[in-house]
Structure formats: structure tokens, C-alpha cells
Image (spheres, rainbow, N blue to C red):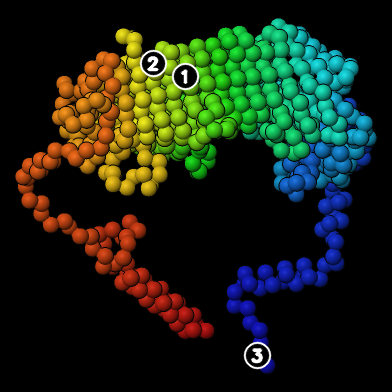
Amino acid sequence: MKKLIFKNPLLLVLSLIFAVLLALPSGVFAEESAAASPIIKQPADISVSIPNEAVFEVGVDHPENYTYQWQYFQDGEGFWRDYMGEGAKVPVLKFSATNITMNTQEVRCLVKDKSDPEKIYESDKATLTLDNVEEIKNYVIAAGQGIAPGQTRNFGGGAMSLSEDGTIITLDNVDLAEREVPVLVGDLQGCLNYTNLEETPKPLTIKVIGKNTLTTNYSDDVGNGVNTMLYFASDNMPDVTVTGDTLILKGGEIGFNVGGRTGGTNCNLIMDANMELGTESDEWSTGIRCHDFTLKTGKTLNINRTNSALNVGGSVSLEPGSSLIAQLTPKDEGSGFASVTAVRIQGGLFINQAAMEITVNVGKDSTRLAPLTALEIAGNCEESQEHLYAAGSSLKINLTSKGDNPDRTALGSISGINSTNKKGIDIFDNTALDIQINMPDGLDALAYNTASNLALKNGSDMTANVRADGSVMGVIAYDTMTVDDASINTSIDSLKKDSFSFALGAQHLKVNLTGPDNKVNATTTQGLALGQYLRDSEVAVGFDKTYQANRISLTGKAVFRTPADTVLSTGSLLVRAADEVNKELHQVFETPYSKADTSAPAKTVVIGVETPSPTPPPKPGPTPGPTPQPSVKNGPSTGLLKNGPDRTVMMASGLCLAVAAIAVIYGIKRKKD
């Protein structure tokens, strides 16, 4: 029998240690750890009523030698999460029972040794039971404290109260701008309203007296901010009206939760107070989420956000004298592409003698943004019904990008206004519409796009200027664009040579100008000034790849300016007088700018598709030499052995050297033995 010889002392020591560990009885280390724990008082189960205070306590021997971190078990996620705030880092945890979902929630405390942070002692679990879940009707949470029906709490020089029936929340000069919440429970702060899920709630009113400020500040220096400032939860949320003076939310959002789903279909918000929503402590939250949104007469809503200001599942109405201002400074979403829409409306947009202004500034640090839209309107409506109607109003869109960023991966699909409903009509009646897009590093930019019909009338004035590096378009109607005693002035500047671009595009363009002040101007530095946007592939049969006009009627003066080097191919536009069909044809698109004026005042012309003049042959140039072909001898390069020897040879050589070295070492050891 051969002897077991350990020539390596380290191997011998490890074997002995392993043998000793196996010989020890089970539970030795667990008993030592338990015996060494400093915890002398464990948290106890408690039962409280919403929205009263819950208190848990842990006791330790020599408490000055330890730090504390309270945690709660997140059922849906299956792991323990830290309570945030300085109040979660002391032996006694206190917070308001703010949510019916806290019922049966488990709580524990982690105790850490200051002298040895590796020593962490875990307390027993304790359970929070809410004893009035079935009876509670309405309550409010503000700055981490609960307000029951009929109760008033004082905050920073003001007061917040809830009416006896739970339907009226009153904010009287409340200032929470510098208030820090000792314990942040979940991610909700500010002013919250909860309603019994089994009842049909009454309409809720928030009365604002004086200037009231809510904030997302809290005492924790690690967390990711607070997501919600005004939050309403019920099974059937009715209208919520904010009325009075001024309400300022420094971050967070106004949100609804119906049956566990954010932004339910029955949640309507009526804003009858001046409101400001800032960006403090949050990066990706929406300013307002609701179904229908109404901004009442003379009120101003100013939303400053990063990626979304207003997300409405229904319609938006701006009453006379009101003003909606949305400002966005987009930020990237990790390593993925960020979809940025300042105002998204699933229903219709109705502006009556009001103002709407949307500004999006893309900073130099943003690298991955696509698509980017200022105003998106789905317009769920019936055939020929208005889904965008603006009368006696002003609508301004301004999209800019700051600085050249060599790391920018994408900044494409840029839209000022995108109206996606194919049945309805966008109407601007005596309304000023100004769209400015200046994104020299952006691609596929367009000012205004509607999937159906666009009508401007009664002195409406639309200005659309777009500058980008790629395909650039001005104003597009998939069906009919009508300009009736109104004006369109669009200028397209594409920085990319030979890009696919045009200024005005429609299936049918109808222009009727009787007044001297109205005009239609379209100018482009690339592509065509006027063209047909061919929506369906079967319509495009027989047309050139470039979009061209099909049926256009003009009464009045229209000016289309196309750059001098534009080549007019099959389907180029020609004009003839409607009552002189057989007369000589005249080109609408002239290559030099000086011949761009195409129609006389008060004369109707119809533009159709005709065969253009022959395209002149290209000028002779130098004969190009052969194109160098890349070598593929060694496959695709990784950059590690660029311009060096074959990697396979080098790897084989290295392997041989390694084997030789092992053989030499083994021979030396055998010789010693």
C-alpha cells in the first residue's frame, strides 16, 4: 500500500482545517453568533388605524456602539428594501400608516457594529396590521403624515385640512419647500388622497389659498428622488378640481391610480388655479397623467420636465385667457434609446382664445434620443370631426439641440406636431402657429404632420422653419391641405447634400387667397418646395421616388422656391390655366430662385403630372481608379493585432512555450525527488 505523501505544506494545512470543520457539531457558529448579538429587545407586532402613526423599536446593549437601518419586505419584489430618511436610522422607527397596502407588512432592523462594519445583526421580523382597512373612506397623506377626515395639520406657516366627508382638501399657504420627511415610506410624498376602493367616490376638490409649495426634498442623501406629489387612488376616480390661487410642485407629478393601474380612463383633472411643476429630484416622471384635462379661464400651467410634461388619455381643453407652457430638457435613459414626447394626447386638442407653448432643448450631454416629438395628438374621433381645433389662439413649438456631441448615437425622428388620426381634421381659425426646429445634428425632422386633413382659415398664419442634417420636411397632410384666406410660410434647410426633403406636401392642396396680406411661401435648400406625400404604395405607382404633387388648385399668390441645382425628373410639376387646357405648359418648379413666382392673383390654376424636359447629361470628369479591396486573410480584425503577424501563429507559438515550460518544471521536480 502506497503512503499518502503531502509534498506541498499548504495542501496539508488546508486538509487538516477541513477535517476539523467536519468534526465540529452542527450549530456551533450559529450559537456563537446568536450569543454575540447585541440585540436585547426585538421589534413587536403592532396594530394601528389608517392614517395613524406606526412605531417599531429595537433595543441593544451599549447602543452608542451601533448604527441602525430599518427595512420592510416588498411582497411584489420578494426582497427587503430600506426605509429612506434619517428617521429610519435610529432605534425607534416612526411613520404614518399611509397606505392600505401596508396591511400585514413585515418590518425588521439591521444593527451594525461601528468598530467592525462587517458585523451585521438582524432583528426578528415584526408585522404591521391595519385594523380599519374595511372602514376607511378618504384620507390624505402630506409630507409623510396622515390627515383623517375633519382633521387639520400645520405645515411651515400654513395648514392642510380634509373635510368631514373627505371630498375637499384645503391648502392654506402651506410651504414644504425646505421640509424633510423623517421616514420616507415607499416613493410617495407631497399630498396624496386615498379612497375606499369599494365605494364610488364623490368629485374631489383641492382648494388653494395663497401660495402653496410642495417639494420632493427628503433627508436621505442616497435615494433616487420622489416620484409623486399629487396622487389619487380609487376604483372609480371622478373629476378632480384644483381651484384657487397658486400651487407649486417642486418636482414629482400629478398622478392617478385606478385598480392598480396608473392613468386610469376615468380620471379627469380640472385646473382652476395657477400651477408650476418643477424638476427637483426627479428625472423621468411625467408632469401630469390623467384622462381629460381642462385648464380654466385665465389660469397658467407651467411644466418644467425632462422627458414628458403632459400625458393625457382623453382630450385637452384650454379655455379663454389660459396659458399652457411646457419646457423639456431631455436626459438619456441608461444605455437604451429615450423616447421623448413633451405633450401626448390620445383624444383631441381644443384651444379657444388661449396660448400653448412647448420648448425642448437637447443638451450637449444627451447621446441617445429617438424619437423626439413636441406635440402628439392621436385624436380618437369620427370621420371629418375635429381632433385639433384652435380658434383665436397661439401655438408655439421650439426644438433645439445645443452643441455637437461626437458621442451622440442618435437624434432622429424629430417632429414638431404629429397628428396621427386618419379620419378627422386639424383646423386653425384665426390662429398663429409658429414651429421652429434647429437641430443641425438631428435626422428625419419635420415641422407638422397630419395623417388626414389640415385647414387654415380666417387669417391664420403658420410659420414652419426646419434645419437638420438629413431628410427635412415642413408641413405635410396625408390627404387635403386647405389654405383659405390664411398664410403659410415654410423654409427647409437640409445640411445633407442630396437628402430627401420638401417644404409643403399633400395629396391635394387647395389655396384660396382673396386678401392682399395672405400668402403661401415654400423654400427649400434641398429637394422640392412642393410635393405630394404618397401615403399608400399603390398610389405611388408610376411616380418617381421623389414625392410630387398630384392635384393642386391655387387662387391668389403662391411662391415656391427650389434650389438651382435641383433636377426635375419624372413627375415634375407643371402648371396650366384651368380654362386653357390646351395652352402652353409652364413649369411651377423653376431651377433658379428668380423664376419662382408661379401664379397671378385671383387666377385659378391646376397642376398635374407631365413629362419634363430632358435632363442634361452629366459633365465629364476624371475617370475613377480601382477601388482598393480590404484583405480578409485573417478574418475580421479585433484591433489587438492590427498590422501584426497572423494571430493563429502567435497563439500556437505561445501554447508551445507554455507546454515546454511545464515540462521543464516537472523534470526539475523529478530530478530532486
User: Where is residue 478 drawn, in percent x and y?
Assistant: 42, 35
SS label for mark 2:
loop
The residue shown at (49%, 28%) is 425
Residue furthest to the top in view is 210
Q: For this rendering, which residue is in front, 337 or 291?
A: 291
Q: Are marks 1 and 2 in contact (CB under 8 Å)?
A: yes
The residue shown at (78%, 32%) is 236
* Residue 392 badge: none
The residue shown at (77%, 17%) is 205
Q: Are marks 3 and 2 in contact (CB under 8 Å)?
A: no
Residue bearing the label numbered 1:
428
Disc 2 packing (10 Å; few <14; some 14–19; many ≥20): many
Residue 625 shows up from this direction:
yes
SS label for mark 3:
loop
For marks 3 and 2, the one nearer the N-term is 3
Q: Nearer the viewer, mark 3 or mark 2?
A: 2
| Distance (Cα) linking label 1 and label 3 | 100 Å
Disc 3 packing (10 Å; few <14; some 14–19; many ≥20): few
Q: Amino acid at mark 2?
A: Ala
Q: Amino acid at mark 1?
A: Phe
* Residue 486 badge: 2
Residue 520: quarter of image:
top left
Residue bearing the label numbered 3:
2
Q: Amino acid at mark 3?
A: Lys
